[in-house]
Image (tube, grey):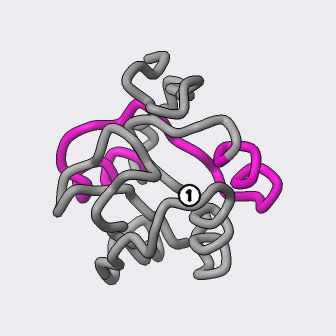
Amino acid sequence: MKIAIACEGKNITEHFGHCSNFLIFDVEDQEIKNEISLPNPGHKPGFLPNFLADKGVNVIISGGMGGGAVSIFNERNVEVILGASGDAKNAVKDYIDGKLKSTGSVCHQHHHDECNK
């Protein structure tokens, strides 16, 4: 399983599309086997969800995300976990342990100053 996290460095960002990088964790047998960082290639409507799904991502974790991106991830069978914060690796461990649940933090304004949390 591949888990991607929208980050600023190693911390989960507030909004998916405006992150500086994505940390992608390979998880096998409930353990993290590998971690890579990919720079955000750019925020264009519809691009990032397909970019990550094409990389084989099964789960995306972020603080918040626009409804369009959520829809594309859903269409691509990528699980969306929103409302997360803090250290990315700890979030992956919590997800593996079944402790990380989505709060449904979907942003409704394009400037994303306020997301429902």
For residue 8, above or below residue 2 = above
* Near-viewer residue (90 or 104): 104
Identify the image quadrant of residue 52.
bottom right
Point 45% across, 41% down: residue: 98
Residue 83 part of the magenta-drawn span: yes
Identify the image quadrant of residue 85.
top left
Point 31% across, 81% down: residue: 36
For residue 45, above or below residue 28 = above
Residue 46 part of the magenta-drawn span: no
* Near-viewer residue (105 or 18): 18
Q: In the visual, does 47 lie left or right of 39?
A: right
Report the residue marked by disc 1.
59
- x%, y% of residue 109? 54, 25
- x%, y% of residue 102? 51, 31
* Near-viewer residue (61 or 51): 51
Q: In the visual, does 80 lie left or right of 90?
A: right
Quadrant placement of the N terminus:
bottom right
- x%, y% of residue 116? 49, 16
- x%, y% of residue 37? 29, 78
For residue 7, above or below residue 62 = below
Point 60% across, 74% down: residue: 51
| Start-end of magenta stretch | 69-95
Identified by mark 1, the residue type is Val
